[in-house]
Image: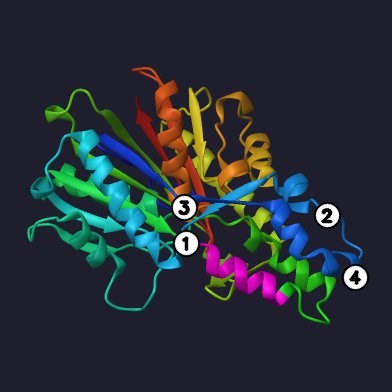
Amino acid sequence: MANGNATFRHSNVSLIGLAEEEAPNRVASQDFDDRLADTLSTLNLPTGLLQRVAGVEARRNWDEPHQFVDGAIAAGRKALAAADVSPDAIGLMVNTSVTREHLEPSVAVGVHAGIGLGPQAMNFDIANACLGFVNGMTLAASMIDSGQIEYALVVAGEDASRVQEATLSRLTRPGITRDEYLNEFASLTLGSGAAAAVLGPTDRHPEGHRILGGITRAATQHHELCVGDHNGMFTDTKGLLAGGMELVVAAWEEAHEDGWDWRDMDRYVMHQVSDVHTNSITKAAKLDSGRIPVTYPELGNVGPASLPITLCREAEHLAPGDRVLCMGVGSGLNTAMTEIEW
């Protein structure tokens, strides 16, 4: 066994409802360039770095920062409707957002109340950077397989506007250095949005999409490479990319040693970060780039909501029997890969 977590397999779990709630306001990367024009000139940096280097043309924001909870509620209601599952049937509701207003109570309680879930639905937050949604699905699937619950709802609602504003304010202050600018560059790729998924037993939902299992793997020696809060996100971009690629390759190889074969999937749905991140994983795992849908050019990095949003938008192009591999790397570092049979 390689130096990591064992792979896991689910026996009777399907994805039966999936939805997103798009934040209403488009914010172009050009708008950030305009606000940073004096800084870029002073530091002798070109405009258009977000577009050319990261591939992020725009991102979305809510009307007000706190509306990420409303977004999660709206996405949750849509997912329940798509699954044709009553709120009273939900045994577990997990909020997986990075964004939160306060330390307690959990974000989950507001979403639980807003959707109108019953008292039988246990609810809590799972926070694991951009991997939270995938981790939430794995936990929910394990509880369904064990017979503890029948149905679970996983949600994520994210707001990036406060990080954006704090970062722009800092990058326009007198005396900012080139290294300081580049250390915060990744903050400007972040976007806002929400997503939700309903999981249930396969034997009761033959129309659903089976969640087969996957792998998780940790490299927490890299936990200081990307640290963020509402005041900004500070990233060692090169170190994060190198550590992330090493971790992805290790997990990929371990999964294949344990019997998975993900070399010819119909889709690879990745956590959405940038051109650099996507191209690096594509090259490292020798993937077909034509099978990798992307949403970051218009949505940016929507944290844990980005992968389910991308899957939701790709769903109409999937056919029964298609094999989908969900892949993500989260600050910390952690990675997860989960196969879904459409």
Q: Tell me whether the residue at label 2 lies in contact with that at label 4, contact meaning CB atoms closer than 8 angstroms.
A: no
Q: Which of pointers 4 and 3 lies earlier in the amino acid sequence? A: 4
- The residue where tag 2 is placed is 47
Q: Nearer the viewer, residue 316 or 214?
A: 316
Disc 4: CA contacts within 10 A as few (<14), some (14-19) or many (>=20): some
Tell me which amino acid carries mark 2. Answer: Thr
Instruction: Tell me the magenta residue range.
Output: 160-170
Q: Is residue 258 visible?
A: no
Q: Is residue 157 visible?
A: yes
Q: In x, y percent, where is residue 302?
A: 50, 52
State the separation of the CA atoms marked 2 and 1: 25 Å
Disc 3: CA contacts within 10 A as few (<14), some (14-19) or many (>=20): many
* Magenta segment, prevailing SS (helix, strand or loop): helix
| Secondary structure state at the residue bearing disc 3 | strand
State the separation of the CA atoms marked 2 and 3: 37 Å
Quadrant containing the C terminus in the rendered view: top left
Disc 1: CA contacts within 10 A as few (<14), some (14-19) or many (>=20): many
Q: Residue furthest bottom?
A: 175
- The residue where tag 3 is placed is 217
| Secondary structure state at the residue bearing disc 4 | helix
Q: Is residue 223 left or right of residue 46?
A: left
- The residue where tag 4 is placed is 42
| Residue at figure coordinates x 58%, y 50% from the top left | 59
On residue 159, which mark appears?
Answer: 1
Q: Nearer the viewer, residue 329 or 219?
A: 329
Of badges 1 and 3, the one in the foreground is 1
